Image (cartoon, rainbow, N blue to C red):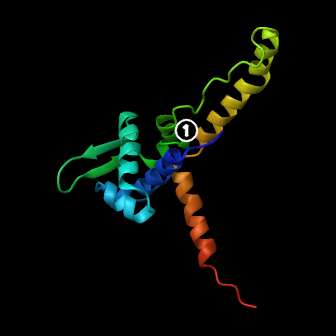
Amino acid sequence: MKISAKGRYGLAAMTYLARHHQAGAPITIISISEKLGISKIYLEQVFSLLKRAQLVNSIKGSQGGYRLTRAPHEISAYDILSAIELALMEKTAPAAPDKMPELDRAMEAAVYTPLDEAIKTTLSAVTLDKILQAFDAEKETDSLMYFI
C-alpha cells in the first residue's frame, strides 16, 4: 500500500484541525497551509474530498474555515484515507485469468483479502487522538537535552 501526497497531506491537515478542535473556532486553509507548508490550492482539493466524506464542516464568511464534524477520537486514519485515496482498497488484477483462474481465486483468498482486511483494521484503530499523542511524544523526545 502506498499513500499518496494528497493522503499524507489530508492526515496532516486533519491532525492539525484535531489539535485545535477544543477551541471550536474554524481554521482557515491559509493558516493550515502556512503552518504545515502545504500548497493552499492542494489543500482546497483535499478539503473538498474531506467535506464530501462529511469529516469536516466548512463555515463561510470572514470568520470562516473548517472544523471536524466529530471528536478526534471518533475519526480514524481509515476514514480520512478512504475519503482521499481513490485506490485505497483497489481490487488486484488477476495474474492468470485464462490459464489458471483457480490460482487467482486462491491468491485472492489467501493473500489479497486478508491483506486488505489487515490494512483496514490497522488504519481504523489509528484515530486522530492517537496521532496527536504520538506527535506530543515526539515533541517531548525532541525537547530532551542530553549532558555528558
**Image quadrant assignment for residue 116:** top right
Work out which residue is located at the far left of the displayed protein and give it: 61
Mark 1 closeness class: few <14, some 14–19, many ≥20 residues within 10 Å: many
Residue beneath the point at 41% across and 65% down: 35
Where's the C terminus, which quadrant?
bottom right
**Image quadrant assignment for residue 31:** bottom left
Q: Amino acid at mark 1?
A: Tyr
**Percent coordinates x, y for residue 68 in the rendering:** 37, 46
Instruction: Out of 71 and 84, give the one closest to the viewer.
Output: 84
Going by the image, does 96 lie left or right of 30? right
**Percent coordinates x, y for residue 139 in the rendering:** 57, 70
Going by the image, does 28 lie left or right of 16? left
* Image position of 136 with respect to 65: above or below: below
Residue beneath the point at 36% across and 34% down: 52
Q: What residue does disc 1 label? A: 78
* Image position of 9 with respect to 116: above or below: below
**Image quadrant assignment for residue 142:** bottom right
Residue 39 appears in the figure: yes
**Percent coordinates x, y for residue 124 in the rendering:** 58, 38
Where's the N terminus, which quadrant?
top right
